[in-house]
Image (cartoon, grey):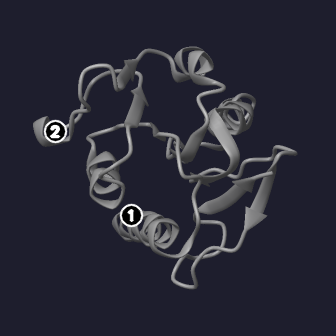
């Protein structure tokens, strides 16, 4: 598969799974949405459309988002995510979306030493995690993804 086809497949899966969460799943009544990996802000922009009444907090190493997709003051956290996100553990998030995989197994292995615990720590009980990397954490119960999402392309969890 070409890298372009893989990219399209990843973004389609991401859109389909987030739309599924918004349309077909129950989220806790309160709590923000956390976007781990702002990038150029495409997913952040989509999350704003899906969850217009929720606070959305985005994390990234540096600001690189398109001007139309920049979080409001107080909702953008810049720095090394493994460090900055620790301050948000306990926030009681309804949804955490994490798309910070690199496609390099050795780099992603390092990310997976801290990401599952951070995601689980941010979520409220009953909250949903969506991740491009598999999150092995005892309090995260794996859920089936929509049929349009290829196996092992994206992962869905509910916090116990």
Q: Image height check: is 31 above or below 45? A: above
Question: Residue 150, percent across and down?
Answer: 58, 76
Kindly indicate the quadrant of the structure image that contains residue 71: top left
Residue found 34% across the figure and 24% down from its top:
76
Residue found 26% across the figure and 50% down from its top:
45
| Circle 2 residues within 10 Å: few <14, some 14–19, many ≥20 | few
Is 57 in front, or is 66? 57
Question: Residue 83, percent across and down?
Answer: 58, 14
Is 80 in front, or is 120? 120
| Circle 1 residues within 10 Å: few <14, some 14–19, many ≥20 | some
Question: Residue 17, percent across and down?
Answer: 50, 68
Residue reaching furthest to the left: 67
SS type, badge 2? loop
Residue reaching furthest to the right: 138
Direction from residue 42 to residue 86 in the image, left or right: right
Q: Earlier in the sequence, mark 1 or mark 2?
A: 1
Kindly indicate the quadrant of the structure image that contains residue 142: bottom right
Residue for badge 2: 66
Residue found 47% across the figure and 39% down from its top:
32
Residue found 87% across the figure and 45% down from its top:
138
Q: Image height check: is 45 above or below 5? A: above
Image label count: 2
Direction from residue 120 to residue 18 in the image, left or right: left
Which labelled disc corresponds to residue 11? 1
Q: CA distance from mark 1 to mark 2?
A: 17 Å
SS type, badge 1? helix
């Amino acid at each position: 598969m070409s890298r372009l086809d893989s990219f399209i497949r990843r973004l389609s899966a991401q859109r389909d799974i987030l739309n599924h969460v918004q349309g077909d799943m129950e989220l806790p009544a309160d709590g923000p949405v956390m976007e781990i990996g702002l990038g150029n802000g495409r997913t952040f922009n989509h999350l704003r459309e899906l969850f217009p009444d929720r606070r959305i907090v985005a994390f990234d190493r540096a600001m690189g988002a398109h001007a139309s997709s920049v979080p409001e003051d107080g909702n953008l956290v810049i720095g090394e995510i493994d460090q900055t996100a620790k301050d948000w553990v306990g926030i009681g998030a309804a949804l955490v979306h994490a798309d910070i995989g690199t496609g390099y197994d050795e780099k992603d292995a390092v990310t997976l030493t801290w990401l599952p615990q951070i995601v689980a720590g941010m979520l409220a009980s009953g909250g949903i995690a969506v991740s491009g990397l598999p999150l092995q954490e005892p309090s995260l119960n794996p859920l089936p993804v929509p049929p349009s999402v290829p196996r092992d392309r994206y992962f869905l969890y509910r916090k116990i």
